[in-house]
Image (cartoon, rainbow, N blue to C red):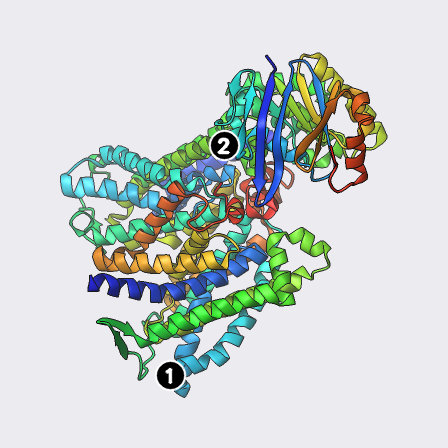
Amino acid sequence: MELIIQVLVSGLLIGGVYALISVGLNLIFGVVRIINFAHGEVLMLAMYAAFWLNKLFGMDPYVSALLVLPALFLFGVLLQRVIVQPIQEASANMQIFATVALSLILQNLALIFWKGDFRTVQTSYAMSTLEVMNIIISVPRLIAFLVALASILLLYGFLKHTFLGKALRAIVEDNTVARLMGIKVDRLYLLAFGLGAAFTALGGILLIPFSSVYPMVGGPFTLIAFIVVVLGGLGSMSGTFLGGLFIGVVESFGGTYVSPALKEAIYFGIFILVLLVRPQGLFGKGKGTEEIGLK
Amino acid sequence: MSAKRLQLLGGVLFAAIIAVPAFVESRFILHMVTLIFFYIAMTSAWNIPVFGGKMSLGHAAFFGLGGYTGAILYVKFGVSPWIGAAAGVAVSLLGGVVMTLPLLRLRGPFFTLASIAFAEVLRMIAIDWRSLTNGSVGLNIPFKPGWANLTFQSGKPFYFLSLILAVAVVFVAYRLRHSALGFHLRASASNDEAAQALGVDTRRAHFIALLWSSGLTGLIGVFYVFFIYVVEPSTMFSLTLFSLQPALNGIIGGIGTIWGPVIGAIVMTPFGEYLRFYLGTIQQGLNYVVYGVVLILTVNFIPGGIVSLVRPKRSNRSDGSGSSSDTKEAR
Amino acid sequence: MPLLQVKNLTKRFGGLKAVNNVSFDIQAGEIVGLIGPNGAGKTTLFNLISGILHPEEGHIILDGQPLNQLSPPRRSLAGLGRTFQVVRPFAMTVLENVMVPLLARDPHMDKARDSAMQMLALLRLEHLADAQPDSLTLAQRKRIEVARALATRPKLLMLDEVLAGLNPTEISENLPIIRQVHEQGVTIFIIEHLMDALMAVSQRVLVMELGALIASGTPQEVTSNECVIKAYLGEETPTC
């Protein structure tokens, strides 16, 4: 019983980070309507940035967020402007090609510049734990969960209550109408992509104290984020949050009771199962699912 | 150029291709041309579902299933590769069913994503299932030359075998595209809702197209394994080699057309090998950076591929790229 | 027995009832018009009947066969043809466009080509057989849309604004085609914003407002119906 709770807790904690990364993807996909296959590479870059800031200047990874997040926000804006905008009206297949190419480029640039080694950041708190009722909780993982939760709530508030947030939601609802209402759609695309990248980068910062970075680290995260978006429903922050937790828990149980090597096989299995049993997504409301094609 | 002249040119070219091994002794050139034939076959097989706008980036799955089946049967059980080829097709068809049935619910990009995941899962299984696949080391095909073993001293038999494969797959793709199925796929790619309202069971059409594609890819996989004497998970299920490469060939040549994949494979195979051997040895990964850049430039400047430059107004219009079954135009 | 029976059909989008408890019949051989202000639920009703959307409640029966459980292609095979308000012909030649529905019924290529040619002749499009649709005028593309739907040999043909957006000359070219199709024995259910045109072809008119059917009758009866006038003048809740 204790083991089960232990596994559940660690699943929930990592699930929070998955949720954060997926929220980033959901924002980009919902607003810009582009499938960004290079999503995980943004995470990879953030992790490397935190690693190097620590290695070269001894900066604490959490502190490095102050530099890394704005940098990757700008990087996201740049991607939107340079790579995505020219193909905004092209077919989905062309967009896939472009972002897959981007992911290939970023992965291999990382390989060229930083080699294929697994790199980790050493911190004083990496190994520290809390014990609550015989359940051991890793401190950096707990921090990751709490920060992820807080930032998702912050984004939720931003989308709900600010003018810019409302404009973003209007675009998610109906792009054309939003444009007709005088919303500067192209600029908001830049904002959405930047924000999405920054949230994903934050995921990377939160991961680095307890996981290593290498050029191909992003791939599985792209997959996870997409699965979470499908599970949670397009444009739904709460659905995405629950979807992230769900995948975290499943991974945790699968890794403990089946085989850590088959993690991705397990996500994929769930993904297919959900498609068969509940094609509108686990928490989906129906609207986004039609967009994805899960009618 | 008139149709007659084009036919004549094609005939001369084809005769020259058949005559090459009689005059060329260079193993390097034979190997390269054989590789081109393999990629023509692979890209054309990959391209069949693209008639209907379904783009897979997980075809390494079928390639690997076929290759592994052939190799395991031969190495572990002494079954002739010719029978292994049939078994390989059967297994990759099965893989096609498993992947396709649930995935057909998905619209364009999500289908593509899930196809990547499918190949990745198979790669992990191939690594994990050591008793059958010998894990990440893989299986070597013992060198026992002879037609029965599909193993040869000379490079010439595979030159012709791969040529036959390429011609056969292109022929199948051509026939499919000009059949009722081809019409259904093209209709679905440009307006799926309308196609359904006209009585086209588009899901069934996509399913059949993917079965053709997966079966043919599996067959090619079997022959390829005997061509390179080895199966290992990182090669057979490689995202870059056998999932992205056919797609890349396709888009450079022109996706959703008959000749696009052929032209794409002819252009990109030597280019890719050059990059791999020269750039790849200077700096690991550099060749893929170049690939990525080429891909982005193509998408931006010639989305219809090379065939669209040659024949600007024909067949390149009805490819999957103009599809509205995707998120973009559905808005 | 009526050709089409629609019983208590309801479709909700969130809290909104886009189609609210709608029932009506269409007899074989009729031309029935469907009118109503924007957002009244006309196209939603078409989408429910053709199977693109699924109703929460109600039944749709074509020629005695319940359609509710059938997929859109099966409904087409059962004899239901439709056009779409936004015409997007397939990216292939005009002839090939018309061959698509024929090939869905019989994969024989030559036969399909011959029948498609005949269909194009009927709609006076044969000279455009080899043209790409995106090089054609809207009126011509709308006719391709009709030709395609007609090639399914429907018992009931549902036309969604096939005249909207056309200039008067084009309307006077396309209008007789509807009559001609009807004379061939096809029952027609037609949505149209252009009142004059609709009233000219319809034998009977249904009126929708806010998802509900508010009136039904001959064109004369409907145009003199107070509810209908109120609905069109934009009264919030027509009291009838």
Residue B183: percent from the left, percent from the top? 54, 29
Count of number-bearing discs: 2
- Image mark for residue B202: 2
Which residue is found at the position 34% from the left and 64% from the top? A12
Q: For mark 1, does the 10 Å Cα neighbourhood hold few (<14), some (14 to 19), or many (20 or more) residues?
A: some
Of all chains, the one bearing label 1 is A
Quadrant of the image containing the N terminus of chain A? bottom left
Q: Is residue C196 left or right of residue A50?
A: right
Q: Quadrant of residue A128?
A: bottom left
Q: CA distance from mark 2 to mark 1?
A: 55 Å
Identify the secondary structure beneath mark 2. helix
Residue type indicated by callout 1: Lys
Of all chains, the one bearing label 2 is B
Which residue is found at the position 41% from the left and 87% from the top? A57
Residue type indicated by callout 2: Thr
Q: Are the residues under badges 2 and 1 in a single subunit?
A: no
- Image mark for residue C21: none
Which residue carries the number 1 mark? A55
Q: Is residue B74 above or below residue B172?
A: below
Residue B57: percent from the left, percent from the top? 42, 48
Q: Is residue B8 above or below residue C26?
A: below
Residue C49: percent from the left, percent from the top? 58, 28
Residue contact between numbered discs 2 and 1, judged by CB atoms under 8 Å: no
Query: Which residue is at the far front?
Result: C239
Residue C3 appears anywhere in the view: yes
Residue C115: percent from the left, percent from the top? 61, 16
**Residue nearest the viewer, comparing A19 with A59:** A19
Q: For mark 2, does the 10 Å Cα neighbourhood hold few (<14), some (14 to 19), or many (20 or more) residues?
A: many
